[in-house]
Amino acid sequence: MKLVLFENPGDKEPRPGLLTERGIVDIGGHVAQSYTPQLTMQGIIDDFERLRPVLEQQQARGEAKPADSVRLRPPLPRPGKILCCIGNYWEHAQREPRPLNMFMKNPEAVVGPGDTIRLPKLTEPWIFMHEAELALVIKGPAKEVRREDWRKAIFGYTGLIDVSARGEGRRTWKAGSWLGKSFDTFAPIGPCITTADEIPDPNNVIVRFWDDGRLRHNYNTDDMEHRVPELVEFASSIMTLNSGDLIACGTNHEGLGALQDGERVEIEVQHVGRMALDVVDPLKRSWEKGVYMGADSTNPEAVQRHRPQSTS
């Protein structure tokens, strides 16, 4: 099942719906509407098992609107927490996994399908990059979850672009702090939340990213250094994870390139879907097109598999 938030023309607030092969099915009359769209979606996550029969019925027979007649919004417009893995993919000839680490990204940075990534009016960061990622949608409260029980803490999955302001090489702006990750519009999420039952193995999912039609990211989540069960165990050992929180699983840095004014970018996560956004830079800066050689790789398709054969 694919859950969305959408707007009809003239709507003041997004409504919950289902993304189906027939189009968008409005489920607003079948779920509790809360004060904000975020809380409405969190309520659906918390009450999903009770709601499942009626939602399955709506998915099969509910009135559907053509997808191009509505506007999709980020399925989680204001998550309580966005935790992002640092690196977390086997790259080049690496033979030992790096220590697992995460940072928190500003929830106010969230935008969604059809929105605009706006580069900040700052001259210090000299390049802005994309990182296309699979993100875990949490079912909480989840605290000290053992890795063998990881499924209890996962409601579903979505796509996330971790837009990053970088200095020299891959160093994140301001000496590697979260600041370069947290500008407004630097957390595109969507296009939907795919429930966990539709992705049996989150470590076998293809993630792709295009910039003006040029393929940059194209990797399998099997290449994670630290896999999804370990991510859930690690994050929940530090803090309580609540429904609607996100864990972004990191990216394969091969294929990184600049985002710049006038471009149209697209992310596609297998079993989740594809969404496009525009890029606007009020300062009209420019960088070399294509993969940024100082970042990681000159491989524009980033399809190489680097996981050592001895790992599982």
Image (spheres, rainbow, N blue to C red):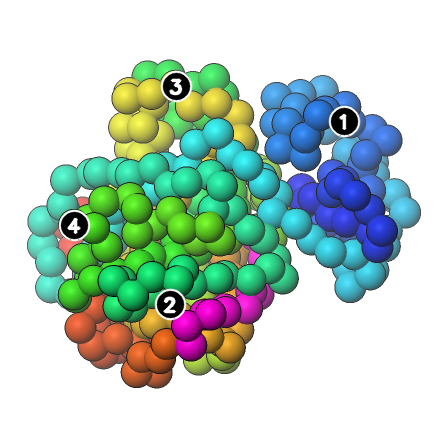
Of marks 4 and 3, the one in the foreground: 4
Q: Is residue 274 magenta?
A: yes
Residue tagged 1? 33
Q: Quadrant of residue 93?
A: bottom left
Q: Is residue 27 left or right of residue 109?
A: right
What kind of residue is marked 4? Answer: Ala
C-alpha distance separating marks 1 and 2: 37 Å
Looking at the image, is 149 positioned above or below residue 267? Answer: above
Q: Earlier in the sequence, mark 3 or mark 1?
A: 1
Asked if the residue under mark 2 is in contact with the one under mark 3, i.e. CB atoms within 8 Å, the reply is no
Mark 1: give few (<14), some (14-19) or many (20+) Cα within 10 Å: some
C-alpha distance separating marks 2 and 4: 25 Å
Residue tagged 2? 217
Q: Earlier in the sequence, mark 1 or mark 2?
A: 1
| Residue under the image location 69 percent in, 53 percent down | 72
Q: Which residues are magenta?
A: 272-284
C-alpha distance separating marks 4 and 3: 28 Å
Q: Quadrant of residue 5?
A: top right
- Disc 1 element: loop
Q: Is residue 187 left or right of residue 230?
A: right
| Residue under the image location 58 percent in, 41 percent down | 77
Residue tagged 4? 175
Q: Earlier in the sequence, mark 4 or mark 3?
A: 4
What kind of residue is marked 2? Answer: His
Residue 275 in view in this figure: no
Foreground residue, 259 or 138? Answer: 259
| Residue under the image location 33 percent in, 57 percent down | 164
Residue tagged 3? 240
* Relative image position of residue 61 (x, y in whole percent): 88, 44
Residue 69 in view in this figure: yes
Foreground residue, 115 or 229? Answer: 115
Looking at the image, is 176 positioned above or below residue 93? Answer: above
